[in-house]
């Protein structure tokens, strides 16, 4: 990821909010980076742009060497479903679908065959140690189990990049540590991770903390 002078301005009837103010940052392939900063500094906006869910108003965003900042929605969606996995604070599982079906969904969007879907979903549920719950619905699971399912869904399409927004925000510390360990394992297997967090404890699992203030990065310190 190479971002240079990224700008995002939200315009409502009377107010203009500069959410990203010529922000620059880089994340190397295989890195695990934490993004921290006070509420309103632009973290969610940055994550939405990194995840190709939203487009910037100015600046450059190179993803895998490709300039994606002026991609239209269709091209963004195509790149997103192949390369990016999302993990959210509130899990964002679909209540009407079983664990298996939730994790299968990204593969349906990619047009993967039924038999390959079955083997890939089972492999990832097994890895996340949630296989025994494959036919249960999200509401029947604990928060920690739901987040393991969400991580399974994020990784089933073997993305290059995982974006995590406060992934432990709704978990107790033991389940939170378990999820952080899962992210660490995925990173050690080569997946790049960018994680927004308010938790200094969780940030210690990363290699590097990018600190933000008022839509800009203020510090990119290396961890020892
Ligand atoms: P955090 O500091 O944990 O990111 P926020 O309360 O700032 O939490 O934001 C929560 C969500 O609400 C984010 O997804 C953000 O994009 C959205 N959000 C924040 N401010 C506004 C706003 N003024 N209008 C619309 N959505 C907003
Ligand atoms: P953070 O995630 O660090 O809390 P956000 O990216 O959510 O910050 O918000 C950055 C700024 O942009 C805030 O001032 C917020 O109120 C504003 N904002 C975020 N989303 C929207 C939106 N959809 N419409 C208008 N303003 C927004």
Image: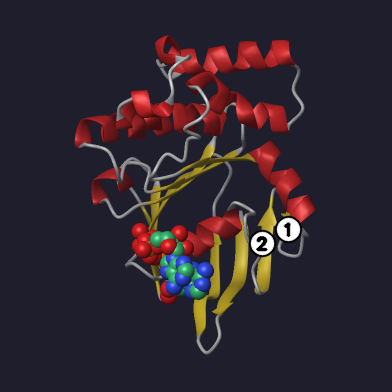
Q: Which of 188 and 19 is in front in this view?
A: 19
Q: Where does residue 17 sit, x and y in percent of width and height? A: 50, 81
- The response on whether ligand 2 sits within 8 Å of label 2 is no
At 73% from the left edge and 31% from the top edge, which residue is drawn? 110
Check disc 1 and report its element: helix, strand or loop. loop
User: On the image, numbered disc 1 is attached to which residue?
Assistant: 68
At 50% from the left edge and 26% from the top edge, which residue is drawn? 152
Report how many numbered discs are placed on residues in the image.
Answer: 2
Check disc 2 and report its element: helix, strand or loop. strand
- The answer to whether 174 appears left or right of 43 in the picture is left
User: On the image, numbered disc 2 is attached to which residue?
Assistant: 61
In the image, is residue 162 above or below residue 45? above
At 56% from the left edge and 48% from the top edge, which residue is drawn? 28
Residue 221 occupies quadrant = bottom left
Is there a contact, CB below 8 Å, between mark 2 and mark 1? yes
The numbered mark, 2 or 1, whose residue comes first in the sequence reads 2
Q: Can I make out residue 157 in this image?
A: no
In the image, is residue 106 above or below residue 127? below
């Amino acid at each position: 990821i190479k971002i240079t002078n990224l700008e995002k301005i939200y315009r409502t009837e009377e107010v203009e909010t500069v959410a990203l103010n010529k922000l620059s940052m880089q994340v190397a392939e295989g890195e695990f980076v934490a993004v921290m900063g006070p509420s309103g500094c632009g973290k969610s906006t940055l994550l939405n742009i990194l995840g190709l869910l939203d487009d910037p108003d100015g600046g450059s965003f190179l993803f895998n060497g490709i300039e994606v900042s002026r991609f239209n929605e269709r091209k963004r969606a195509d790149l997103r479903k192949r390369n990016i996995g999302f993990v959210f604070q509130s899990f964002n599982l679909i209540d009407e679908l079983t664990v298996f079906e939730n994790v299968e969904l990204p593969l349906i969007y990619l047009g993967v065959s039924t038999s390959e879907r079955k083997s890939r979903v089972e492999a990832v549920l097994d890895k996340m140690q949630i296989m025994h719950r494959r036919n249960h619905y999200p509401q029947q699971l604990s928060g920690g189990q739901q987040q393991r399912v969400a991580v399974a869904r994020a990784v089933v399409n073997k993305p290059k990049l995982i974006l995590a927004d406060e992934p432990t925000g709704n978990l107790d510390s033991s389940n939170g540590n378990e999820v952080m360990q899962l992210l660490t394992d995925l990173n050690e297997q080569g997946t790049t991770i960018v994680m927004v967090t308010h938790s200094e404890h969780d940030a210690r699992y990363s290699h590097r903390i990018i600190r933000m203030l008022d839509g800009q990065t203020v510090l990119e310190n290396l961890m020892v």
